[in-house]
Each structure stands twice: as C-alpha cells, then as structure tokens.
Amino acid sequence: MFPNIASEKIYVIGLAMHAAVHAERGLRLEEMVFEVSHRALRNAGISRKQLDNVVIAACDELDGRPISSMLMAAPAGGYLVDEIKVTESGLNGLAASVARLRSGEFQAGLVVSWCKSSKTDISAVMRLRNDPFYYRSLNIGGLVSDGMLAQAVASEFAVTRDEIAHRVRAAYARGASNPRGLGSPVPTVDVVENGAFTALPMRETDLAPLSDGAVTLVLCTERFLADNRQCVPLATLSGIGWASDSYLLGMHRLRSFTAARNAWEMALAQSGLSADELDFAELDTPSAWHEAALARIFGLIDAQISPSGSNFSQNPFFCMGLINAAEAVLKLSGAGGEPANARPRRAAAHGCHGFAQQGHVVAIFEAIGGQVN
Amino acid sequence: MDNGLAEAGHDVMSDEITLRYDYALGKVAGRFMRGLKEGKILATRCSKSGLTYLPPRAYCERSFEPCDEWVEAGSQGVVEASTIVVRGYEGKRKAPVAIALVRLDGVDSAIANYVDGLDLSDPASAMTRIAPGTRLRVTFAAEREGRITDFSFLPL
C-alpha cells in the first residue's frame, strides 16, 4: 500500500473544454488556449492575477515549434505567473499542478493542455520519438506497439474478438449520448467485425479516431477557497497517482501493466476508496483493447467505465486524460446536466502516454459534500 | 470566439522544416553496429547485476554501474511479442511487414526486428507462426551496412 500523503484538500473550482472537433482549422493554438483558459477562470470566479501558478501540458513536436510554452504561457494566463511545462500528457500536468499546491508554496493554479494533431503528420512525430539507433528504421512506434499490446491483452486476459467488438460499439454509444462529444455514429457489428487490420490483431475500427481539443482546469487549496468565498467548488481531488513502466518493450512490460496498477493503487490509497466505491472511471483508452485490459486491472464493471465515451467521444490524444478529468468533474458537480438525484459522488479519471501505455496517471475526484473521511 | 474580431475563416499556412541529425553512435552502439557488419549480435553485460542488455546499453539501469562485458547473443531466441503491420506503416520496408520482439538466447531483454520467411498474404495465419513463445532464428543480410536492419528473424 502507498502512504496517504494528501495533507490538504485540493478543489477544482473552474473548467472549460474546447468544443469537440475532428480538425480545428479556424483557430490557431493561442486562440484555442486563451479561449478555454479565459472561460475556465470565469467559471472559477477568479481573475488571472489571483493565480500563483500555471502548468502547461503539451507536445512541442505536435505544436510545430520548440519550447512552445514561450508562446503559449501568456494565453494560458501565465503572464508574470510562475509557469512550468510538462511534456508527457495532460493528466501529468494535473499531477504537477496538484504537487505544487500540496507543496504549500502555491494556492491557486491553472492547468491547461491541448492537442491539435490534425495540423501535422502524427505518424512522423511518433517516428521521431523512436530511439534513432535501434528502432527508428523499424518504426516501432504507436502503430506497432499498439498491435503488440493488443496481442498481449488477448493472451493475458483471454480477450475475444466478440468482446472487442462489443466494447467498441458500447464506447461509441456512450460517446453519442455525450453532448460535449463529436457525436460519432455507432458502427454496426458488421463494420466493427470486418474492419481492416492495422497491426494485427488491432483493427482500424478498434481504435478511436483522433480529434483536436483543449481543456483547462482551475485548482485551489482549502485556504484559498476560505479566502475567496465567491468561488463555488465543483469537486475535490482526493487522490492522484502516477507511474511509468520500463522503456524496455517485452512480454513482461506488455502484459503486466505494472504502471497502471501502481498509479491506480496510489490514487485510491490517497482517497481512502476502493474501486467498487467509485461511481465511474473515465479511462484513457486509445482502443477497445486498452479498455479491456484496464477494466480488468482496475476491477471495474461495465457500468463504471467511461460514461462520457472517453476517446470514442473525442480523442485529442495528448490531453485526453485531462479531458477525462473535466468530464468526471462535470458529472460530479451537476454541471454536466445530470439530475441531482442521479448525480454520482466519486469518480476516477485516467490518462496514459508513451508507446504501449508506458506511463499512467489516475486522479480521484469526489463531489462536494460527498468525501469519505 | 465571439470577441468582435473579424472571423479569419479557415485559412492555413503550410510550412515544412527539414532537419538532419548526425547522431553519434557512441562506444556501445558503435561496437554493436560494427558487430552487425561482421555477422555478430553483441550485447552488453553488467557483472554487478548480472543483466545482459540487448539492444546493448552503456550502463546498467539496476546497478547504475557501467556495463563491463560484451557478450555475443545466441543465434536463436523466443518471441515475446509480435505483430504484422498491414497499413499505415512507414519504416525501412513497405507494409505488410512482420515485426517481433525476440529475446535471443543468453540475453535478458528482447530486441525488435523484421521477420522474414512468412507468407504475409494471409496475415492472420502468419501471426500463428510468430506467436509469443515461438522460437525464431537470426539471419543476416548478404550486404550489411552497420544498421539494425542488417539482420532479421526467420521461423525455424
């Protein structure tokens, strides 16, 4: 078990998401980031000057310029504000923001992440990320490693083609009912069963199509909340865990999901909750194979899995984990439109990054007034 | 954005930047690549942890000591993971390609490479020949250039 290191409650007091879109051609990144950050601050009921830190989570290669935070800090509210950047994933940005608040050095932070993969050749970016000596000419990137991961999941968990087809259709169906999603139609069984292979056993239809997006969360400490009574907290963050697996791809790495297990257990231990006490978990699942594995590893039943549709609702892959966090908070707060008598109380948000899900982050959120002591 | 500014439409400005990198192979990758030219697959070993790394590494991540020994990997090994990429692949070869992570005899980690000798017109059937646990053997290209693609795997 991991020690409970949560010394102070962290609150989500504001959020905003860019409207889901396959390819955002009408706005440049600065405009997208300013819009979601400005709206999130308004949602939080605080001004930019009340922020004492900003965390940016983004990918320079996808953004198309090095050290993109030089350009993006200001539209994220970072003018004359302590700002750092993380490059793993959006939910790693949340973890960094929470760590800063728990350090006692900061009281109010904004975390923003975006992904506009439509602007470039994402497969070339993935190839660039390969080790140049041993693997780049083989291109052991996302395509190959996802195929190998699917093979490992099928073998380790006895996952069948029927299960994958069911999960694909169910995920699209959940996404279709999410008003913040792309509204993609649910494919027929025939389409899913006969989708073209990409890297066996992965089929194109098993993968969630990529889209563009951006998301901002505003966090604060209990002390900040006490000093700013105009803020209405949307949810508390009661646990967060992150872990990375070995860089060495192999049978153990692909089958053990050690990092996912560790991140999950760390977050739950901090919150004092067990998996069956969660109303739902928004899982970062680039494919149905990922969902099949994570459902088993995390001990989740179908009714708990990604009510938003997660990646099958929208899939700006770098910031997908932070979008999952926003979706979870919206449901817990009632801002997502859930009736009060059906409102969930506890939820997890998950994000992953790296080839074959090398890294994982899990955050636990609880509704205001619903914390377990 | 409803900010009163004129809508810019959906114009895009395309740009392309070509960068060339001269990666220093260093001591370890350099010797590994020279070994490939000679028809040998060389791994590094840490005498403190006892781990043998392939692809070779200069240091041991467990002991945090330099790897202090070279070991020639076996010419056969066992598949740890595999796939056949049918589309969307941009590597040295054109799709379809079979790729496997193989732990060669005498080393502790798996190395990836293409698998030859398969009928890829029926990828599902070909996958059964490179399933995890299957043993494969190493074959070297007739003309070698000191690159990872100097060798590939073949079914036994």
Image: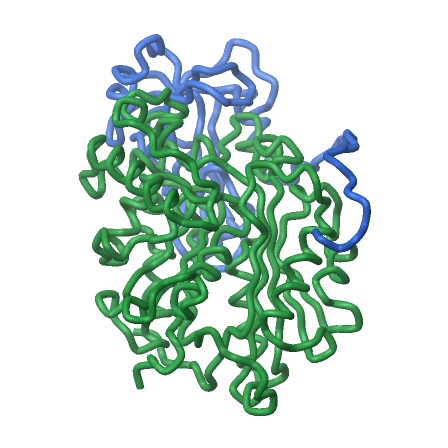
- Asked if residue A278 is positioned above or below residue A309 in the image, the reply reads below
Q: Looking at this view, is B147 or A117 the one in front?
A: A117
Q: How is the image coloured?
A: by chain
Quadrant location of residue A169?
top left
Residue A266 horizontal/vertical position (percent): 36, 69
Nearest the eye: A328 or B132: A328
Residue name at image x 41 percent, y 24 percent: A198
Residue A40: where, in percent of width, then height?
A: 61, 66
Residue at left offset 42%, top offset 18%: B86
Q: Residue A82: image x %, image y %?
A: 72, 73
Vertical relation: A330 (above or below) A173: below
Residue A150 shows up from this direction: yes
Q: Colour of chain B?
A: blue
Q: Which chain is green?
A: A
Instruction: Give the residue at x 39% y 64%.
Output: A331
Please tell me in which quadrant of the rendered image residue A36 appears.
Answer: bottom right
